[in-house]
Amino acid sequence: MTISSSLNAGVAGLAANASRLATISDNIANSSTYGYKRVVTDFHAMVTGSNRGTYTAGGVRTSNLRLVNDRGSLITTANPTDLAVRDRGMLPVTPLSSLRGTGSPPMLLTPTGSFRVDERGYLKTPGGHVLMGWPANPDGSISTHPRDNSTSLQPVRVNFNQVTGQPTTAIDLVVNLPSTATIAGANGDPFEMSVEYFDNLGVPRTIGVAFTPTVPGAGASNEWTMVLTDDAQGGAVIGEYVLTFDDDRSAGGTLLSVTAVSGDAHDPATGAISVDVAGGPISVHIGRLGEVGGMTQLSDIFSPVEISRNGSVAGTMTGIEVDENGFVHAVFDTGQLRTLYQVPLVDVPNPNGLQAMDGQTYAVTRSSGNFYLWDAGDGPTGPVIPYAREESTTDIAAELTSLITTQRAYSSNAKVIQTVDEMLQETANIKR
């Protein structure tokens, strides 16, 4: 019985070291595979006990564990949609083949991927896995979605043949008005300028702005009448305001008061007024009362200090990019960005319990625990890194060392089997 158990232990040792050799071979073969997570083989002694001074060999068994929680080094690339995750969290993907069916596509997880737009507009890896995210609303906002299931996630699909414009909703109008124009004896001529904005169809329009000083009979009034007109409405007045400036030593030249003659009142908290152009309201920021960075009246200079607005003319899409918060943006030739999707990061309590699938992807299992969809950079997750790939976690030097010890262990177990065979032969020879 003891000799037989020795034979069984030797056979178990051969099988265990063969299993370890398989994981080492897989690790070495994938040492250059982006996103690969190395597998380790653990040995466990099997004890069958002893009886009356004899010992029965139990042998050994193995268990294999893929260390999904290990993180490889990040390397930079030239592709803006090469994505990796710094620290914890994984990207949600789905097989391209699953998009041909009905219902919600299954969600898999991947630590990194080289995503590129295919002929149908899907952002996918060479292995055929499509990036998933929440689609943005027309205004670029992201609706609220459940975080404990993937039914609201959709494959990221981009249409490069789109032309889009962005209407102007906000204008910064910061001007310095000459204080000498409000002194008695000044000519009272208005100062005029125009500000470009874009309507709802991406067509350039202008708001005319005229500043007319109030000239007193004596002294200085420090008062101006600002009139805004819209060329899309045939030059109709869309707002008229009386601006009064402070001449105090500490706050001289800043806005003291803004009185609306027509149009919405000045908001002292934001420093903005709202005017209605042909396409809708536009917020015009002129500065808060007493604010140095707002509208001023100093010296004898009429100077537009800052004239800016959001929105753009109609432009053609030229590319896509992903920021560290997981937002997928369309890039247009006008320089504007438009949010298309938000890609969340998936986290599970036990990453090492995930089931390995093809193409460095993983499926959620009972052992991994339930997943949660985080905004990138929130909770335990790190940011999304564009222009980057995660390298394999295989350490070649360590694997080659393990290869040597495994070979020696395999040879030793083979020697045990050979010795047991010789002992059994000797036992058989006793009969002769």
Image (cartoon, rainbow, N blue to C red):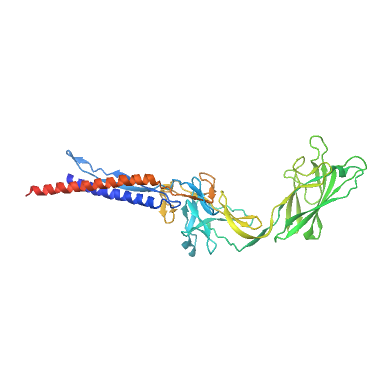
List the single residue furthest toward the left: 432
Give the camera-side residue of 391 and 175.
391
Q: Position of residue 347 (x, y in %)?
A: 48, 48
Q: Is residue 18 left or right of residue 198?
A: left
Q: Position of residue 392 (x, y in %)?
A: 44, 49
Image spot of residue 65 (x, y percent): 37, 48
In the image: residue 142, left or right of residue 224: left
Q: How many marks?
A: 0
Asked if one can make out residue 109 in the rendered structure from this viewpoint, the answer is yes
Give the left or right position of residue 214, taking residue 347 as reference.
right
Relative to 334, residue 185 above or below: above
Image location (x, y in percent) of residue 319? 59, 58
* Point 90% across, 39% down: residue: 219
Q: Is residue 199 above or below residue 23?
A: below
Front residue of 274 and 177: 177
Can residue 372 be seen at all in this image of the molecule? Answer: no
Quarter of the rendering containing residue 158? bottom right
**Residue 17 falls left or right of residue 145:** left
